[in-house]
Image (cartoon, rainbow, N blue to C red):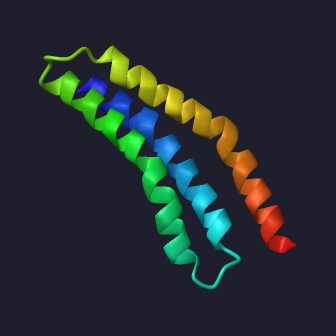
Amino acid sequence: MGAVVLTLAAGTPALSLIGAVGAALAVSLRRGGLLMAILVLPLTIPVLIFGVAATTSAIVGPLPFGQPFTILVGLSLMSVVLGPIAAAAALRFGLE
């Protein structure tokens, strides 16, 4: 059960910050919801795939837990570093 909580804790920042960047891009547009769906969905798929792979390997166990979890943590760290920068740039661009 601890591995499932770790996987959830590792994937949540990535999904949140990807959504924040999409919302920052869509905030100044009329049909921003459509743009947000088109931009955010392809970026969330890898996070979901590696989150499901890590959870499945932790519960069922034929695959090692470490590899998909490490990739998930890497995706989260990348989104933590790049997400606020991209969201700030999108908001700044939307104000102009």
Residue at position x 36%, y 31% in the image: 7
Where, by quadrant of the figure, is residue 54 drawn?
A: top left
Where, by quadrant of the figure, is residue 41 drawn?
A: bottom left
Residue 69: x and y, percent?
38, 24
Q: Dividing the image into 4 quarters, which one contains the C terminus?
A: bottom right
Residue at position x 75%, y 46% in the image: 85
In the visual, does 83 lie left or right of 35? Answer: right
In the visual, does 16 lie left or right of 28? Answer: left
Residue at position x 57%, y 82% in the image: 31
Q: Dividing the image into 4 quarters, which one contains the N terminus?
A: top left
Which residue is situated farthest in the bottom direction here?
A: 30
Residue 80: x and y, percent?
62, 38
In the visual, does 16 lie left or right of 59? Answer: right
Residue at position x 66%, y 65% in the image: 25
Q: Nearer the viewer, residue 2 or 93?
A: 93
Q: Is residue 24 above or below residue 70?
A: below
* Number of numbered discs on residues: 0
Residue 24: x and y, percent?
67, 64
Where, by quadrant of the figure, is residue 65 drawn?
A: top left
Residue 11: x and y, percent?
43, 38
Q: Nearer the viewer, residue 90 or 13?
A: 90
Q: Is residue 22 above or below residue 9?
A: below
Q: Is residue 87 above or below residue 5?
A: below
